[in-house]
Amino acid sequence: MASRRQADDQSWFDREVRESDFQDTRLRRRFAILLDKLWAGMGQTIPFACQDWASTKAAYRFFSNDRVSEHDILSGHFNATAARFAAAAGPILVLQDTTTFSYQREHPELVGYTGTSTTRDRFNQTSVRTQCGILMHSSLVVTADGLPLGLAAVKFWTRKQFKGCSELKLLICTES
């Protein structure tokens, strides 16, 4: 049973990675290795999932490589989702959500800002705090029975990139 699940996992990896749009085959191979390690260590940090210093360093180099973009990483999954969508029968739903990832950092300007929050202390004095992090808007494609087919779109941003929601809506609509 476990070997069949491993074969199914490998088949899924192969399909998702094969459809990716990396310009260099070495990057596609590195991505496949990294995806395999992250899958085996799901929920763990990159160093724990990679298990040794060389693999950890390779993972961070991959993510910081100028020739690797968000589009390159997600393109295989988006293409595979489109194929699953085309093969599905019946009504299909696209569920959308915006998620905030908040971080506490010594230098928040390196990550970006998600917004501000206002709080009152016990003396009823107001203080405004800037929240550090990134925002993600995702579109999950599911069948009417609730079977997830994959992500159709993902957009990451911080507040320093966009001044208001109307500008963001315009950007998302023109990229589609």
Image (cartoon, rainbow, N blue to C red):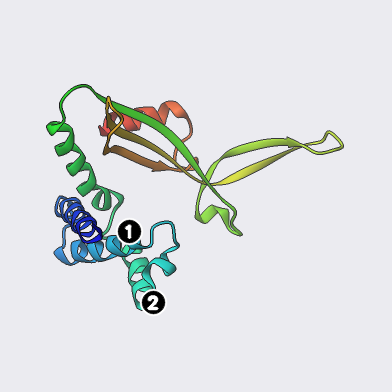
Which residue sits at x=61%, y=59%?
A: 106
Q: Residues within 10 Å of mark 2 (few under 14, many from 20)?
A: few
Which residue sits at x=65%, y=37%?
A: 117
| Position of residue 76 measured from the top left corner of the image (x, y, whole percent) | 20, 49
- N-terminal of the pair, mark 2 or mark 1, is 1
Q: Quadrant of the C terminus?
A: top left
Residue 27, above or below 117:
below
Q: Give SS at disc 2.
A: loop
The CA span between labels 2 and 1 is 16 Å
- Of the pair 93 and 159, the residue shown nearer to us: 93
Residue 141, above or below 16:
above
| Position of residue 56 measured from the top left corner of the image (x, y, whole percent) | 38, 71
Which residue sits at x=28%, y=32%?
A: 141
Amino acid identity at mark 1: Trp
Task: Return the residue found at the far front.
Answer: 1
- Residue under pointer 1: 39
| Position of residue 155 measured from the top left corner of the image (x, y, whole percent) | 36, 40
Left-right relation of 111 to 122: left
- Residue under pointer 2: 52
Left-right relation of 73 to 119: left
Q: Quadrant of the N terminus?
A: bottom left
Q: Give SS at disc 1.
A: helix
Foreground: disc 2 or disc 1: 1
| Position of residue 98 measured from the top left corner of the image (x, y, whole percent) | 44, 34
